[in-house]
Image (spheres, rainbow, N blue to C red):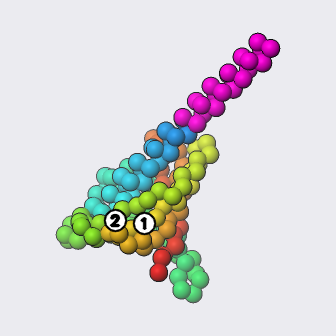
Amino acid sequence: MKKLYLLVIIIGISILSFSQNIEEEKESIKKVIQTAYVDGLQNEGDAAKIESGFHPDFNLLGIDKSNKMWKYSIADWKSSAVKKRNSGELPLTGDKKVNIEFKNVDVTGSAAMVKIEFFIGTKLTYVDYISLYKFESGWKMVSKIYYKVD
């Protein structure tokens, strides 16, 4: 009986430790997305913030009206954001500012998928699905697909 009781305690502690670790990973992922994607790329055009959370091989994937897939590299997207910053179009303020709501953060080992709602001001504009991998340097976004809300 004592062995069974000890086993139950060990399993319980292991489960608590594992779930605490997953919650820490989820918070790290949220911070990466907020800093690199929302603040760095969308609102500020800050190259250092963008580079902090995007893998260099990241691609935004989409489909056009004729159902053909296209991709946009993070290098091109970052360049566009920095140009906007240099021309005064960024940083965004007021009701033009981008904000997000995290709807789901799913982590399995070193892989994660995040669903967010993307708002311009208060208007829901996109639903994004962002894939991440955990590297030695931390979580990095590696791809994104999206749905444009009408």
Q: Which residue does the image show at 48% across and 76% down from the upper left?
A: 149
Q: Residue at x 38, y 49 (%)?
A: 52
Pick the front one: 66 or 150: 150
* Main SS of residues in magenta: helix
Left or right of 37 in this view: 115? right
Depth check, front residue: 110 or 11: 11
Based on the picture, tell me whether residue 16 belongs to the magenta stretch: yes
Q: Is residue 149 above or below residue 132?
A: below
- Provide the residue span drawn in magenta: 1-20
Q: Residue furthest top?
A: 2
Would residue 58 be visible to someone looking at this image? no
Q: Quadrant of residue 1?
A: top right
How many numbered discs? 2
State yes or no: residue 36 in magenta: no
Residue that sits furthest to the right in the current view: 1
Neighbours of disc 1 within 10 Å: few (<14), some (14-19), many (20+): many
Question: How many residues crowd around disc 2 within 10 Å: few (fewer than 14), some, or many (20 or more)?
Answer: many
User: Hey, what amino acid is under mark 1?
Assistant: Phe
Residue ID at (20%, 71%): 87
Residue 58, horizontal then vertical, whole percent: 48, 60
Helix or strand or loop: what does disc 1 sit on? Answer: strand
Q: Amino acid at mark 2?
A: Val
* Residue 94 appears in the figure: yes
User: In the displayed structure, does residue 40 sit left or right of residue 87?
Assistant: right
| Frontmost residue, 46 versus 20 | 20
Provide residue 25's location: percent of width, then percent of height.
51, 41
Q: Which residue is mark 2?
A: 98
- Quadrant of residue 13 within the rendered picture: top right
